[in-house]
Amino acid sequence: MKKIFTLVLFSVLMATAVFAQNSEKNILELAGQKITESGEITNQDWLEEGKVMWDKENATLTLDHAKIKCNARAIRVFNADNFRLNLVGKNEIKAVASYCIVIGQNGTAKIDGDGSLTLSENSTKGAILIGKFSSLEIADCSLDLTAQDGIVGSDGKSEEKLIINKANVRVNPLGGMAYGAIYDFSSLILQQCKIVTPAGAIVEKGAIVNPASHERIKGEVVIEAETSSIEERFAEAKGQKDSMTFDLQGRAVQTMQHGCLYIKNGKKFVFNGK
């Protein structure tokens, strides 16, 4: 009886420990090192330049002009709950691991900021892996990913979701184990951006594919952000935004008509002159 009680107690304690781990949100590992409850990054031997800061309360990991080199997964987060990877300035990662950035199962995550992130020189077997029932949004930033494999979901059948929103993303699979540049998602959405390389490539069944063969692209894929509105497109015209006037179809006009709507300096206005 005593042995049975001890076995039951041990099982209960193990189950409690597993439950506690599974219920904890945003468990973060950097370069194979688990970050403590306080959010302190005690060992930064893998950080060659810049800063890496973890704000556990706001679930935000900031790379600030960081240059990371390690022999493990550079960034891995479990139970991601609105986890954010904030990019400030130019950042670079070289990590020898199965995937450089891993979002575990049942998570929500976002990569954004006004900076960029580069994975370079065949540094990883894979760039980004999104686990089952997880989602990742890449927004308003630039990613340049060179790796054996690209941005991938778990199996394409487990509600993996990838959103690329007004971001510049280049994925350059180097072959070998590469099965594609971007693939295996239940949902793949491009917002305010477009595929420019290879020409004519489309989104189909959770992957970037060749429209003729319907096979996933295994070579370079480049996605570029579009300006969000007609006003912004005209405002960004170099050397001309202060002097040119456009109609709503984007055509430059020399003579305006009374009562008509035009755009100048990125703003709409009604011409009330003659």
Image (tube, rainbow, N blue to C red):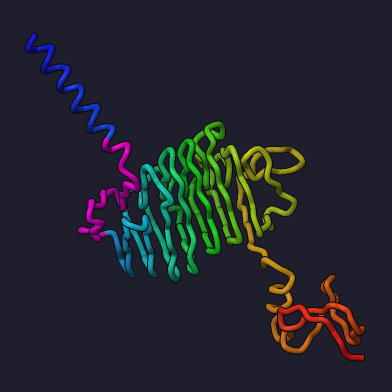
Part of the protein shown in magenta: 20-45
Q: Is residue 234 visible?
A: yes
Residue extending farthest to the left is 2
Q: Position of residue 91 (x, y in %)?
A: 42, 65
Q: Is residue 239 above or below residue 96?
A: below
> Left or right: 234 with respect to 68?
right
The image quarter containing residue 14 is top left
In percent of the image, x 9 and y 12: which residue is there?
3
User: Is 231 a magenta residue?
Assistant: no
Q: Is residue 195 above or below residue 270?
A: above
Residue 173 position (above or below residue 153): below
Quadrant including the C terminus: bottom right
Furthest residue toward bottom:
274
Q: Look at 48% across and 57% down and name the residue there.
A: 111
Q: Position of residue 270 (x, y in %)?
A: 82, 81
Specify the principal SS of the magenta part: loop
Residue at 34 percent of width and 45 percent of height: 25
Quadrant in the picture for the N terminus: top left
Image quadrant where residue 51 sits? bottom left
Q: Is residue 40 left or right of residue 222?
A: left
Instruction: Pick the residue in front: 104 or 12.
Output: 12
Taking depth in this image into account, of 178 and 156 the one nearest to the observer is 156
* 210 relative to 127 in the view: left or right: right
Relative vertical location of residue 161 with respect to residue 236 in this rendering, above or below: above
Magenta-span inclusion, residue 40: yes
The location of residue 228, given as percent across then percent down, is: 67, 66
Q: Where in the figure is residue 160, as x and y percent of width and height?
A: 53, 39
- Residue at 45%, 39% in the rendered image: 131
Front-most of residues 2 and 111: 2
Q: Is residue 126 visible?
A: no
